[in-house]
Image: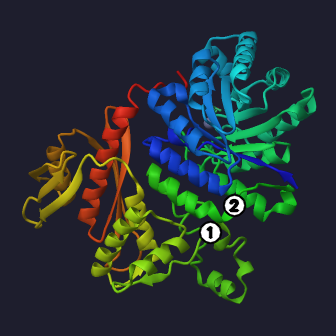
Amino acid sequence: MRKIYIFDTTLRDGEQSPGVNLNTREKVEIAHQLEKLGIDRMEAGFPAASPGDLAAVNAVAKAVKNSTVIGLSRAREQDIDAVREALKGAQDPCIHIFLATSPIHRQHKLRMEKAQVLETARSAIRYGLKYLPKVEFSLEDAGRTELDFVVEMVTMAVQEGASVVNIPDTVGYLTPYEYGNIFKHIKENVVDVDKIQLSAHCHNDLGMATANTLAAILNGADQIEGTINGIGERAGNTAIEEIAMALETRQEFFQAKTSLQLSEISRTSRLVSRLTGMVVPGNKAIVGANAFAHESGIHQDGMLKEKTTYEIMTPESIGLKESKLVLGKHSGRHAFRERLIELGYELSEEELNRAFGQFKDLADKKKEVSDDDILALLEEKLADTPEVFTLKTMFVTFGNETTPSAKVSLVNEEGQVIETEAEGNGSVDAIYNAIDEASGESVVLSDYSIKSVTHGKDALGEVHVVLTQNGLSVQGRGVSTDILEASARAYVDALNGLIDKRKNYSNRVDYNS
Ligand code: KIV
Ligand code: ZN
């Protein structure tokens, strides 16, 4: 079995999804989970984008012990210097330098001839290798580049000493046959190709990212790049969990495997979804809520007789456990802690006290508290954005023949209580108007969604919002048995995130500029 190296770019290409903006703490939290998942290499960001991005990559570099940490760089010395700085303290640093190679990009974006592209990339790889032990070089838009120029570029990268050469289908344009053929062609035509690892990097514009990546593996790719839940620019990147489970489930066909800890897939997916605010669609392969649900009578009957009739992989293999009814209002702190450990959370005393208090409040409102309820509460609380504002109280009036109004009190960082009252065209609108007035922030609500965590009329409601201010978008999440309270909590959470990100990520440079 050939080992396929997994390069995760959730924290870089994934973070380029519209509305996603991870702060340093969130990046480090995801990086730790990626380590648990057994990711070989992780791209932590684009340090030249802003001092905030550089600091976030540096925090990841210092926190991660068992994976290679990578910083993205254009083929420019100042970008390479930023990556050098950001990767200080990394156990196994690597720089990822890219330059576009396709005729469209050469002509319209770079305004460079082939020879200039070749020499610019050569100088950048040389400069990178002066300061960092490993360079991965990417031919941006390789998928639309002349095959002979691809060979020329890869040959140059081999000669200059790059460790990995990446062949991105940047715009998700190719079919599996065409993409696989590029790898075959490189393998057959680049002298000393075995000195490097070849990497596949696909986008999902035509829904073919996973198929294309698998075609690359069949044609000799040593590494694949992707994101958790397939998040990323436009239609997203290859979903790592799909590749991992395809190789696992069809081992004999692919004759290749990853070293991922597959039972961490579900938890990683949840975390990325929570911190990015990108809800995983129910029918998403592997990690969607319905991926292992059997609805039709015929399927259920088959499953009862023999699971393999309709199940090609088990939910347990990705770490999904049946949600159990756990504790009630008489359960003690010890039982609660034990249950959390079983769920994979080891909390500090302070976090445990806070979570236990929350659990008790919930158990007072809800007869039966399940694992999913506990996880929802816990995950809301573990998001540790500094709380500039906290929601203290709220009072809402609604009648179908009156104008809804809300009275809200927030506590600010100085401990002052700010009380406001506002009307709106609905209860949520009234609450949000009151919070806007109390916080003094002017924001646009770009997205609002609500779902129930479990079943039943007393289920917890989970609200996600996206707030936008001057081009910066931030998501927030709130959980409560009352959907109006969950709505208010999500809004305040997003406001706190926005204030935090405004400090760290202003004047960000786009890597394609
Ligand atoms: O899709 C792409 O081409 C990229 C490069 C920066 C590698 O993400
Ligand atoms: Zn990409």
Q: Residue at x 72, y 19 (%)?
A: 130
Q: Amino acid at mark 2?
A: Gln
Residue 328: x and y in percent read: 37, 84
Label 1 neighbour load within 10 Å: few <14, some 14-19, many 20+: some
Q: Which mark is residue 261?
A: 2
In the image, residue 384 above or below residue 498: below
Callout 1 secondary element: loop
Residue 433: x and y in percent read: 16, 49
In the image, residue 408 above or below residue 103: below
In the image, residue 474 above or below residue 266: above
User: Which residue is outermost to the left?
Assistant: 402
**Lower position in the chain sequence, tag 2 or tag 1:** 2
Residue 229: x and y in percent read: 57, 53
Q: Is residue 287 left or right of residue 469?
A: right
Task: Quadrant for residue 44, please give it.
Answer: top right
Q: Which mark is residue 303?
A: none
Q: Nearer the viewer, residue 334 or 308?
A: 334
The residue at which mark 1 appears reads as 319
Label 2 neighbour load within 10 Å: few <14, some 14-19, many 20+: some
Q: Nearer the viewer, residue 394 or 38?
A: 38
Q: Residue at x 30, y 46 (%)?
A: 496
